[in-house]
Image: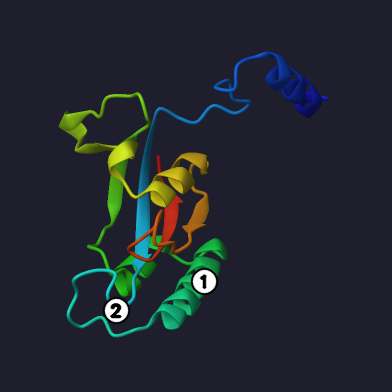
Amino acid sequence: MKKAICIMLLGVLPIFVFCKKEPDRVTVQHILIAFKGTIPKEDLTRNRDEAELLAKEIFERAKNGEDFDTLVKEYTDDQHPGIYKMSNIGIDPDKSKDEYSRARMVKAFGDISFKLGVNDIGLAEYDPETSKYGWHIIKRIE
C-alpha cells in the first residue's frame, strides 16, 4: 500500500519529490581497488580484470562481517583510514568537520554513500565516467 501511494504521489507531484529522502550528511569509510593507470601509484601493477575480481571478493568478505577497518588497512589503494564526511547536494559542507560536498566527490561514490543505511556496505563499480579511480567498497559509519 505504501508503495502504491508513493507511486500515485509521484504521478501528481513534481519529479523532485522522493519517496525516501537521502540524509543531509553521511560519514563513510571506503576501500579503493584501483588498477594500473587509474591512480598515480608506481607500484600498482594489477590490471582491470584482477582489480574487479579483488574488489568483488573484498566486498563479499565485508558483507559477511569481516572487520572493515582491517580490510581497509590491508587492501585500499587510498590512504587508511579512508574515512570521508560528506554533505548532500544543496547542503553546505561543515568545514569545522572536514566535510566535503557530495558534488566534489566521484559521482558513483556519492551515489552509493547516500543510499546506504548506517553500517550498510555497498559497491561502486568502476566506470570511466562515474568511478574513474576503480572500485569503491563503501561502509556508511554515520
Q: Quadrant of the N terminus?
A: top right
Kind of residue at badge 2: Lys
Q: Circle 1 sits on which residue?
A: 56
Q: Is residue 23 left or right of residue 5?
A: left
Circles 2, 1 touching at the beta carbon (< 8 Å): no
**How many discs mark residues in the rendered view?**
2
Kind of residue at badge 1: Lys
Quarter of the view holding residue 80: bottom left
134, 142: nearer the viewer: 134
Q: Earlier in the sequence, mark 2 or mark 1?
A: 2
Marker disc for residue 6: none
Taking 1 as reference, is 79 above or below it? Answer: below
Residue 86, percent from left and from top: 32, 38
Q: Residue furthest front?
A: 129
Q: Colour scheme used in the picture?
A: rainbow
28, 91: nearer the viewer: 91
Residue 18, percent from left and from top: 59, 25
Q: Residue at x 45, y 30 (%)?
A: 23
Is disc 2 placed on a helix, strand or loop? loop
Taking 76 as reference, is 142 above or below it? Answer: above
Residue 117, percent from left and from top: 52, 41
Q: Residue at x 63, y 26 (%)?
A: 19
Q: Is residue 79 left or right of residue 61?
A: left
How crowded pointer 1 is (Cα within 10 Å; few <14, some 14-19, many 20+) is rated as some
Q: Residue furthest right?
A: 1
Q: Circle 2 sits on which residue?
A: 36
Q: Gap between marks 2 and 1, in whole Å?
A: 18 Å
Q: Residue at x 40, y 50 (%)?
A: 109
